[in-house]
Image: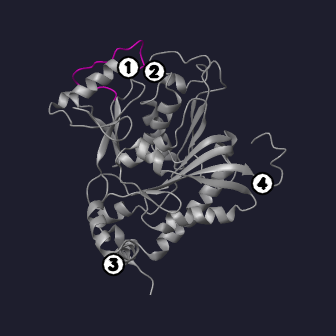
Amino acid sequence: MALRGEEGWHAAHAAAFGQERWQELALAMERDHEHLCYLNPFLPASEMEVIQQDYSLEPSSVPGAYDFMVPENWERQFPVVDASDERHLFVDLVRPERHELELRGPGEELAPFVLAEGAALIVASALQAEEGDHVLDACANGTTSLVLAGGMFKRCPRGQALPQNLQGKLVCNEMVKAKAQTLQAILRSLVPWRLFDTQASIAGHGPRVVFTSVDMATPSNAAERLGPYDKILLGAPCTDDKALLRGAGASRTWSAATAKVSAERQLKWLHNALWLLREGGIVLYFNRALSAEEGDRVIERLFKRVEGTFDLEVMPLEELVACLVPGLAAEPTDWGVHIMPDRTSFGPMFFSRIRLVRRMHHGCEQSPFF
């Protein structure tokens, strides 16, 4: 008999992790999300110092992110303006007291930070986006796009003209139209306006940060026309086990087929992403599911599907994650890394970094696109 409902969900994960580990893991997933304060990298140092004082910031193990305390005085707090996803809290540009902005002109205000769950910051950092890269944030949520933009446009602080020799482009995609509009508003509150402006980029063609709203399951779309890409961050829709556990009665809808349906969709998205990459390009695939069906097995099935079409390699993550997050208890898997909430403050999160070594399909030798 197929496993179904809350009882089946617990039984499936107990079988995968062992009863003792699963009891600890289930308890850990019931906890609230632990947020870190990720400072806006485009702010001047003087403003960062004020935020560090008022929010009692202490460096965390995640690059650019801090443990924090909300000021007791509400007038020194930046009001939360979007909490539609409890993992990512976005704040207003200004606060009632201590309006410390040193503006060079109107319209230069930026939100000073985001409060984000640490695993999202880790996966975005692990892509290692840098200036000159052409990057697709395929399932952008605002937080990941800010991390990527911070790595790509370090020479573009708020209030200053873009460097004449600036290169690189960040494409931020959200499939759902309503969410795409919200994403645009959020990111425009975090990133200097010149990076969106068609006329501000002297060296390049068009804006440095652009938005799309396409389904990555479709093989031809606006994201493809803006490619090819050096790096892609792909967080395909998945079984959100933490949300299932914490949602009132949500796990009752679970069945053993849930992971299989999600895995099929993830495999399709990941396969399509390969066609958008340059040779030598990297796709970082991640999701929040516990099941290996949506983790290692998706990568394993991808390698089998593309035999004779793409030559791929999985890039080791253990050393990179250890470098990015010293002391993080990341668990290596056959095809990637798992961050689990019973061993860390973050997760669950599975991710794998895949490099497209070379194309072997018909016609790739003549294509100027790749």
Secondary-structure class at tag 3: helix
Q: Upstream in the sequence, badge 3 or badge 2? A: 3
Query: Where residue 273 sits in the image (x, y, percent)?
Result: 63, 51
Q: Label 4 to label 1, Cα distance in Å?
A: 47 Å
Q: Please give the residue where the numbered disc 2 appears in the rendered image.
A: 157
The residue lying toward the viewer, choosing from 173 and 296, is 296
- Residue identified by numbered label 3: 7
Q: Which of the marked residues, 2 or 1, is nearer the chain's N terminus? A: 1
C-alpha separation, residue under disc 3 versus residue under disc 1: 52 Å
Residue 168 in magenta stretch: no
Q: Indicate whether residue 106 is drawn in magenta.
A: yes
**Main SS of the magenta segment?**
loop
Magenta span of residues: 93-108
Q: Quadrant of the N terminus?
A: bottom left
Q: Residue at x 76, y 41 (%)?
A: 369
Q: Are marks 3 and 1 in contact (CB under 8 Å)?
A: no
Mark 4 or mark 1, whichever is nearer to me: 4
Amino acid on which disc 3 is placed: Glu
Confirm whether residue 247 shows in the render.
Answer: no
Residue under label 4: 360
- Circle 4 SS class: loop
Mark 3 or 1: in front is 1
Neighbours of disc 2 within 10 Å: few (<14), some (14-19), many (20+): some
Task: Determine contact: label 2, label 1, CB under 8 Å.
Answer: yes
As shown in the figure, which amino acid type bears the numbered disc 2? Pro
Q: Secondary structure at mark 1?
A: loop
Q: Quadrant of residue 240?
A: bottom left
The label on residue 44 is 1
